[in-house]
Amino acid sequence: MTFARACATAEVALGSARATMVDGVPVAVVATDDGWFAIHDECSHAAVPLSDGDVEDSHIECYMHGSRFDLRTGIPDQLPATVPVNIYPVSIDGDDVLVDVDNPYHFEEN
């Protein structure tokens, strides 16, 4: 895996997302009670930043039309989005959040 620094842990408040670029890829870094997540920072329905949306539990909701994505899988569980978005491996190294955009996780809907 190829991890690169996305941001500092202090830059992401619990229950929120922060937009960043990792090796040219737009990423939303998210801190929740369930841990740290990294998701492609573009809604698959409307091409707007997911990092501007609301975070609740292990989900992020697009502010434009209400599509909601599972941060663990990238799969939308609320319309209008029907196409998953990439999620990326995350590692915490001291005060840094590291993300591997070269090896996104892939999940299939049931």
Image (cartoon, rainbow, N blue to C red):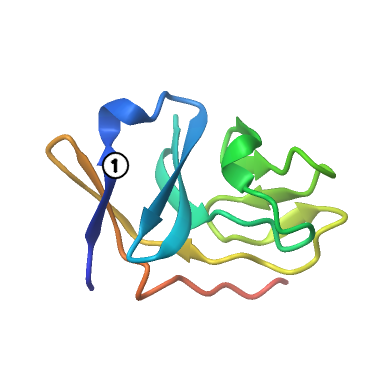
Q: Which amino acid type corresponds to the residue marked 1 in the rendered image?
A: Cys
| Point 57% across, 72% down: residue | 107
Instruction: Name the image quarter holding residue 22.
Output: bottom left
- Residue 53, image x and y in percent? 66, 36
How busy is the neighbourhood of tag 1: few (under 14 within 10 Å), some, or many (20 plus)?
A: some
- Considering the image in quadrants, where does the N terminus appear? bottom left
**Nearer to us in this view, 44 or 25:** 25
Report helix, strand or loop for mark 1. Answer: strand
Taking the view exactly as shown, the residue that stands out farthest to the front is 24
Apparent side of residue 106 relative to residue 11 in the rendered image (left or right) = right
Question: At 29% from the left edge and 42% from the top edge, which residue is drawn?
Answer: 7
**Image quadrant where one finds the C terminus:** bottom right
Instruction: From the top left corner, tell me how far across and down residue 33 is, in percent.
Output: 44, 29
The one nearer the camera, 106 or 6, is: 6
In the picture as drawn, the residue positioned furthest to the left comes out as 94
Q: Is residue 62 left or right of residue 99?
A: right
Q: Is residue 75 above or below residue 37?
A: below
Q: Is residue 27 above or below residue 58?
A: below
49 shown above or below 52 = below
Instruction: Give the image location of residue 57, x and y in percent.
Output: 58, 33
**Residue carrying label 1:** 7
Report the number of numbered marks. 1
The residue located at (79%, 61%) in the rendering is 45
Q: Is residue 4 left or right of residue 65?
A: left
Instruction: Please report the residue visible at 17 percent of the width from the left and 34 percent of the height from the top.
Output: 95
In this rendered view, identify the residue nearer to me: 57 or 6.
Answer: 6
